[in-house]
Image: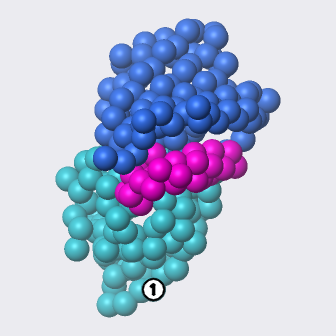
Chain colours: A blue, B cyan
Amino acid sequence: MDILNIKVNALSANESFLRSTVGAYCTRTNPSIETISDIKTAISEAVTNAIVHGYSGDIKGIIDLSAKIEDNVLYVTISDYGKGISNVEQALQDFYTTKADEERSGLGFTIMQSFMDTLEVSSILGEGTSVKMSKRLVG
Amino acid sequence: MLNHDIKNGTLTLKMSGEIDHSNAPKFRIGTDSLINHGGFNRFIFDLSGITFMDSTAVGFLIGRYKILKKLGIPVYFHNPSREADKVLKVSGLYTIITKI
């Protein structure tokens, strides 16, 4: 049993806080620096999505991060209770963005998919979005 | 952090540290002010000092590329750190901006 649960407000300062925390949490299994770096990038993408899209910058929004390490695999879920995604399939496409005018690249999910082993996105309009990812840490 | 120098018409912008959604606006303001100042005909992003970047940084780089392209100024990447290189590869940015 090795779990981690964190609840934070949707503040952009929490992007670096959450990615660094999960990165530090994973070091107990002695993964490579590259593996940690990949995980930090994917976490950053999911947290940024919650802040920018889920809550549109409303810092009262809550982000829940839960993680566990089981048999050297990291499982992490990042949830928001914001506006949700109307079409998840479309959101997962490379370069798709609803905020092109803000210089959003539309590559957040592409990066999560490339940097992690698995990615699952579930969303209900008006209720929020949950991003589940996993990655083998060693071996 | 941003450091720059202009030599023989080339502006080299050295970006260092972490770039994400929380601090991208600072990088944007600093870089756009340099671009508006002019005095160069070639632009190089030196990414050797980047310790973290995500897709927000990619959006920032594409945004600057578009501005410079409109001005007819060629843009290059130089010496990306391992962290920057992987994100640039996955993003396909090397197909529009050459690494030198």
Residue at the location (74% across, 36% down)?
A: A8
Q: State whether the magenta stretch is mostly helix, strand or loop.
A: helix
Please name whichever residue, B79 or A4, is drawn nearer the observer in this view of the structure.
A4
Secondary structure beneath dot 1 equals strand
Quadrant assignment, res B49: bottom left
Q: Is residue A18 magenta?
A: yes
Asked if one can make out residue A75 in the rendered structure from this viewpoint, the answer is: yes
Position above or below: A59 against A23: above
Asked if one can make out residue B62 in the rendered structure from this viewpoint, the answer is: no
Position above or below: A78 against B34: above
- Which range is magenta? A13-39
Residue at the location (32% across, 26% down)?
A: A93
Position above or below: B34 against A13: below
Residue A56, horizontal then vertical, whole percent: 65, 29
Q: Quadrant of the N terminus of chain A?
A: top right
Q: Which residue is mark 1?
A: B5
Q: Residue furthest right?
A: A60
Residue A29, horizontal then vertical, whole percent: 47, 50
Please name whichever residue, B85 or A97, is drawn nearer the observer in this view of the structure.
B85
Quadrant assignment, res A33: bottom left
Residue A125, horizontal then vertical, whole percent: 57, 9
Number of numbered markers = 1
Using the image, name the chain to which the residue with label 1 belongs. B
Using a 10 Å C-alpha cutoff, classify the residue at mark 1 as few (fewer than 14 neighbours), some (14 to 19) or many (20 or more): few
Residue at the location (53% across, 44% down)?
A: A44
Amino acid at pointer 1: Asp
